[in-house]
Image: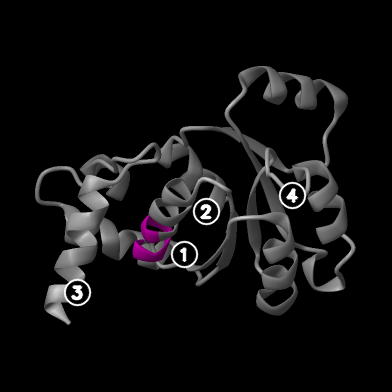
Amino acid sequence: MLRMGLAIRKLGHKLHWTGRLSQEAFGRQGNNEVRWKAQCMKDVAIRKVLLVDDHQVACKSTAILLEMSGYKVRTAFNGRTAIEVAGEFSPDIIILDIGLPDIGGYELLNRLKQFKELQTTKFIALTGFEEEIARQKQTGSEFHHFLRKPVDTSQLKALLNA
């Protein structure tokens, strides 16, 4: 079990949102890792998060980060899978890339909002385009929040804990 934990930790240090995840993404500052993890576990009443992103490395590394922070996490790499997982998992939060290959992010959002199990779910849009964020804020999108890729981990943590 210890070896598996070390392997995940090493993987986490090698990966980032764009392929390399830094120690800062896990909240390490010096030797305070244990205290940081304990604080995260205390702050988080086990919440369920669904990550939907076609960039699998980014999706998996974000999932590792959230699991280390005490969240239950599921991932989906396309819209069809997201619909299936959301229906059975009933997540509290869905982080949704709006540039998916099979179903557009806004169309997927509308489909997911029809599930009665997801009426209280918080939807967070993920995009690589700053212009998209500005445009959607002006037009009043149905997403609760927008995050720009690569994700700022402190901003993500603040949104999830709000």
- The residue wearing badge 3 is 4
Q: Are marks 2 and 3 in contact (CB under 8 Å)?
A: no
Q: Residue shown at 83%/42% (left/top)?
A: 142
The dominant secondary structure in magenta is helix
Task: Check disc 3 and report its element: helix, strand or loop.
Answer: helix
Whichever of callouts 1 and 3 sits on the residue coming sooner in the sequence is 3
Query: What is the three-letter code of the residue carrying label 2?
Result: Asn
Query: What is the three-letter code of the residue carrying label 4?
Result: Asp
Q: Which of the pair 140/61 is nearer the observer?
A: 61
The span from disc 1 to disc 4 (Cα, nearest Å) is 33 Å
The span from disc 1 to disc 3 (Cα, nearest Å) is 24 Å
- The residue wearing badge 4 is 102
The image position of residue 127, as x and y in percent, is: 62, 33
- The residue wearing badge 2 is 161
Numbered range of the magenta stretch: 64-68
Task: Check disc 1 and report its element: helix, strand or loop.
Answer: loop
Q: Are marks 1 and 2 in contact (CB under 8 Å)?
A: yes
Query: What is the three-letter code of the residue carrying label 3?
Result: Met
Picture quarter with the N terminus: bottom left
Nearer to us of marks 2 and 3 is 3
Q: Residues within 10 Å of mark 4 (few under 14, many from 20)?
A: few
Task: Check disc 4 and report its element: helix, strand or loop.
Answer: loop
Q: Is residue 108 left or right of residue 157?
A: right
- The residue wearing badge 1 is 44
In the image, residue 39 above or below residue 134: below
